[in-house]
Amino acid sequence: MARKVRRVPYELDDGGIKTMPAEEIAGILRGADDLIMSGGRGLLGKILKGSRAQDVLRLGLDSSPVYGYYRSLTLAEISNRVDWVILQGYLDIEYDYRLPMLVYTPLSRPKGKRANYPRICTRLRE
């Protein structure tokens, strides 16, 4: 018999955020672009914060165009924004064995190799 996999639990907290500008949503989606099914919310938060953590540097994520996008915010505030994007259906979480990973939803899935984030911003404003 196979052993039961103990999945790492997660809890989403939007911190009471009611709305977010389309540009911020697009920035978070661009940051998630490098992490789809390879990273989670914590790593995305570190990229958006501009963290010099070893895992960010080792994976070359400090070259992301949105690296440091939320430099002036705390990691908790950034996590609230990322969780809001997930709760609104722009991103989702799926387990890869035992770890929760970020995945696109039909609302945010890019058409082609790279997402056209200005187009997403326009669609979000409508």
Image (spheres, rainbow, N blue to C red):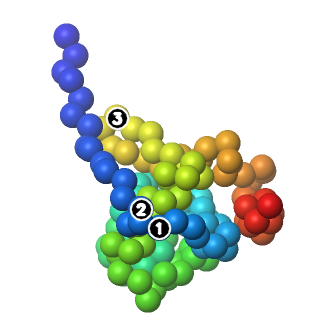
Of marks 3 and 2, which one's residue comes earlier in the chain?
Answer: 2
Image quarter in which the C terminus is found: bottom right
C-alpha gap between disc 3 and disc 2: 26 Å
Residue closest to the eye, 57 or 48: 48
On screen, residue 92 above or below 4: below
Disc 3 on helix, strand or loop?
A: loop
- The quarter of the picture where the N terminus appears is top left
Residue in view at x 33 percent, y 72 percent: 76
List the residue tagged with mark 3.
97
**Which of the marked residues, 1 or 3, is nearer the chain's N terminus?**
1
- Which residue occupies 22% across, 16% down? 2
Tag 2's secondary structure? loop
Looking at the rendered structure, the kind of residue marked 3 is: Tyr
Secondary structure type for disc 1: loop
State if disc 3 and disc 1 touch (CB < 8 Å).
Answer: no
Q: Where is residue 118 in the image (x, y as percent from the top left)?
A: 78, 69
Q: Name the residue under label 2.
A: 14
Quadrant of residue 73 in the image?
bottom left
- The residue type indicated by label 2 comes to Asp
Q: Position of residue 17 (x, y in %)?
A: 47, 67
Q: Which mark is residue 17?
A: 1
Q: Residues within 10 Å of mark 3 (few under 14, many from 20)?
A: few
Contact between marks 2 and 1 (CB within 8 A): the answer is yes
Q: Nearer the viewer, residue 97 or 77?
A: 77
Q: Which amino acid does label 1 sit on?
A: Ile
Instruction: Tell me, yes or no, if residue 14 can be seen here.
Output: yes
Q: Where is residue 23 in the image (x, y as percent from the top left)?
A: 67, 74
